Image (cartoon, grey):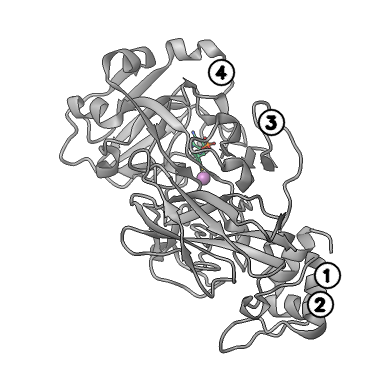
Amino acid sequence: MKKTVGLHALYRSSTEIADRELWGREANPLTRRGFIKGSGLAAMCAALGASIPFAEHMPAGLIPAALADDPNDFSIPGKDGLVVLNDRPINAETPAHLLDDAVTPASRVFVRNNGVPPKLGPDAADNWTLRIEGEALDAPVSLSLESLKRDYRQHTLALVIECAGNGRAEFYPAAKGNQWTTGAVACPEWTGVRLADVLEPLGIGDDAVYVAYEGADTHLTGDPSKRPISRGIPVAKALEKETLLAFAMNGEPLPLLHGFPLRLVAGGWPASVSGKWLNRLLIRDRVHDGEKMLGQSYRVPCEPVAPGADVSDDDMCIIESMPVKSLITSPRSGVTVPQSAPLAVRGHAWAGDFDVRRVYTSIDFGASWQRAKLERPANRLAWQRFSASVRFPAPGYYEVWARAVDSNGKAQPMLLPGWNPRGYLNNACHRVAVRVMA
Ligand SMILES: Nc1nc2c(c(=O)[nH]1)N[C@H]1C(S)=C(S)[C@@H](COP(=O)(O)O)O[C@H]1N2
Ligand SMILES: [Mo]
């Protein structure tokens, strides 16, 4: 069986039909387990090139991780192995096995642009100014990037940025937008000054509600009266000590694609609040109403809805902290390993504004779980390394699944969280395919 988009499309149109046509698999309506057997099991085993020791635990409608799309080759200058989803504007994600580093190198940070990035030479940093104004500030202020660097204490923090649409590709009915799989997340080290240190001396009014950004990118249509994006965060999040006005990533000036020469970084929230090419901050006396704040953008139904439901704008709530999630960064999905040695499994887990308390792994499609070793984050809002050693009972096709639990006791859903119209917040367990040979 070839790995094609057709497989996903088939599953998206109807998991029942796809299961039946591909493998003759009938779901048991009570357990949602696959009950794949006989010729269907033989067909799936043939496609996977191995027997499936835990086949009886395989959920109905599950596309085997081994058959999920492979990264294609492509190139963006300075990027290494990322998969381009869209080239106008440029959007690219990073395959899981390339996100293994504790601190994500610049070459492996996903790229998400809503508009056209500004064209800036290296000297743009020398005369960049940040204007701060808004209803909840008495008088507008202009600060040069130079003075930001010179007059405030600098901080370096590892902060997770994750696009709210990361994982969108798995939702059914499908949601429009970049079909991110798992790679729109990164945890580089950011250097900058605390937004709080800059705002506090300015005397923010008691009426301040939101801090919003504007950047120097332009709308895709070229219309100068339109903005590609202008989002914001509540004042409390803006004043957290981890919220930075960042000018460097991993000790180098910000790459142009990541917001050179200045960006906002508010870790743990949808990365869409971390405005790039930052040239204006607005201290708002209301919830910001800029581009991509209203309607259904970066919002999910306030109460769960049935898949495919029409949800009115009034019933949509702004996404704040991102949900608990994990990513297996080694081994790479599709590896073949000998049964004789235990397999080292590792990855990262993160939980929005919270800590990850536990990570578990499973090799039997979630029927049983083993606790992994979990490290502390480098700082608040950084991701946490987990590692486990896994033994397989027999040769065959396996999937290693990882499941994280946050400090509130919330766990990742095994297959999919609640559906939402724009396909945000898919924090389902990550799965990698492993073939075990005798
Ligand atoms: N000015 C500006 N800032 C922006 C965006 C943008 O299009 N323009 N995209 C946002 C979104 S949706 C995401 S996910 C992150 C992506 O950051 P990255 O490209 O550095 O990974 O930037 C955010 N900040
Ligand atoms: Mo995003």
Which quarter shows the C terminus? Answer: bottom right
Q: Name the front one of labels 3 and 1.
A: 1
Give the mark nearest the N terminus, 3 or 2. Answer: 2
| Quadrant of the rendered image containing residue 122 | top right
Rounded to the nearest whole Å, what is the CA distance between mark 2 and mark 4? 57 Å
* Disc 1 + disc 2, Cβ < 8 Å: yes
- Disc 4 or disc 3, which is closer to the eye? 3
Where disc 3 sits, the SS reads: loop
Label 3 is placed on what type of residue? Ile
- Tell me if 202 is positioned left or right of 255 in this view: left
Q: Residues within 10 Å of mark 3 (few under 14, many from 20)?
A: some
Do callouts 3 and 1 mark residues in contact (Cβ within 8 Å)? no
State the residue position of label 3.
76
Of helix, strand and loop, which one carries label 4?
loop
Q: Horizontal and vertical percent for residue 15?
A: 69, 75
Residue kind at label 1, given as amino acid type: Ala
In percent of the image, x 41 and y 51: which residue is there? 374
Residue position marked by numbered label 1 in the rendering:
46
Q: Is residue 98 left or right of residue 407?
A: right
Crowdedness of circle 4 by 10 Å Cα count: few (<14), some, many (20+)? Answer: few
Residue where numbered disc 2 is placed: 42
Which disc is residue 120 wearing?
4
Amino acid beneath label 2: Ala
Separation of residues labelled 3 and 1 (CA atoms)? 37 Å
Measuring 66% from the left and 84% from the top, which residue is drawn there? 27
The three-letter code of the residue at mark 4 reads: Leu
Quadrant hosting residue 76:
top right
Cα separation, mark 1 vs mark 4, equals: 53 Å
Q: Where is residue 428 in the image (x, y as percent from the top left)?
A: 52, 62
